[in-house]
Structures are given as structure tokens and as C-alpha cells.
């Protein structure tokens, strides 16, 4: 006898707002990388969202991973930019 699953109730997971916020902050951090706090917030929000998603509370793992990667790249770009600017100013004798 064949059984179907039409009558079963499955939990509906909501999309994580932290994952979306992390991705948006990651994109903004890439565009405006001179604001160093934005990529850091993207990393924090995306990390918290990934933890909640892995616990099964929410969905949106792709958003969270995208925010995490963009946040890391944005933070690295900020550090690189500040290093180059500091080295240039030091070479010119401004510091």
C-alpha cells in the first residue's frame, strides 16, 4: 500500500533578517570601503545568522555566506587601503 505525504505539516522556516542585513552591509561595505565599521558589521551579522540557520531556526544560508564573504573582502580591502595610504604619507614625510 502506497502512502502519500499530502496531509503532513512541515515547519515553515522564515528567512533570516540578519542574513539579509549581513548581505546588504557586505555590498555597502564593498562600495564604501572607507567606512571600516560596515564590513565588520556584515561579518558579525552574517556569522550570527549562519549560527541560527545551522541550528534550524531560519533559512537563508546563501545570503549569510554572501554577507560573510563580502564582509571579509571589504575588511581586507579597508586594511589594504589604509596601509597603502599610510605608507604613501610616510614616504612623503607627512607623518
Image (tube, rainbow, N blue to C red):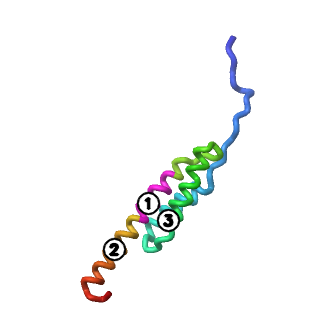
Q: Is residue 83 above or below residue 20?
A: below
Q: Residues within 10 Å of mark 1 (few under 14, many from 20)?
A: some
Residue 40 image label = 3
Magenta segment's dominant SS is helix
Q: Are the residues flagged by discs 3 and 2 in contact, CB closer than 8 Å?
A: no
* Nearer-the-camera pick, 60 or 57: 57
Residue at the image point whose x is 57% and y is 48% from the top? 60
Q: Over which residues does the magenta segment extend?
A: 65-75
State which tag comes first along the sequence, 1 or 2. 1
Upstream in sequence: badge 1 or badge 3 = 3
Q: Is residue 72 left or right of residue 14?
A: left
Query: Is residue 65 found left or right of 81 in the rendered image?
Result: right
Mark positioned earlier in the residue sequence (3 or 2)? 3
Instruction: Name which residue lies at 57% across and 60% down.
Output: 21
Q: Position of residue 13 (x, y in %)?
A: 66, 44
Q: Quadrant of residue 44?
A: bottom right
Residues at marks 1 and 3, CA–CA distance in whole angstroms: 8 Å
Amino acid at each position: 500500500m502506497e502512502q502519500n505525504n499530502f496531509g503532513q505539516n512541515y515547519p515553515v522556516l522564515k528567512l533570516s533578517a540578519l542574513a539579509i542585513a549581513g548581505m546588504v552591509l557586505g555590498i555597502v561595505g564593498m562600495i564604501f570601503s572607507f567606512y571600516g565599521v560596515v564590513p565588520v558589521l556584515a561579518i558579525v551579522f552574517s556569522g550570527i545568522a549562519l549560527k541560527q540557520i545551522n541550528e534550524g531556526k531560519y533559512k537563508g544560508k546563501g545570503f549569510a555566506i554572501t554577507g560573510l564573504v563580502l564582509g571579509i573582502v571589504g575588511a581586507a580591502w579597508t586594511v589594504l587601503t589604509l596601509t597603502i595610504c599610510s605608507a604613501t604619507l610616510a614616504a612623503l614625510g607627512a607623518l
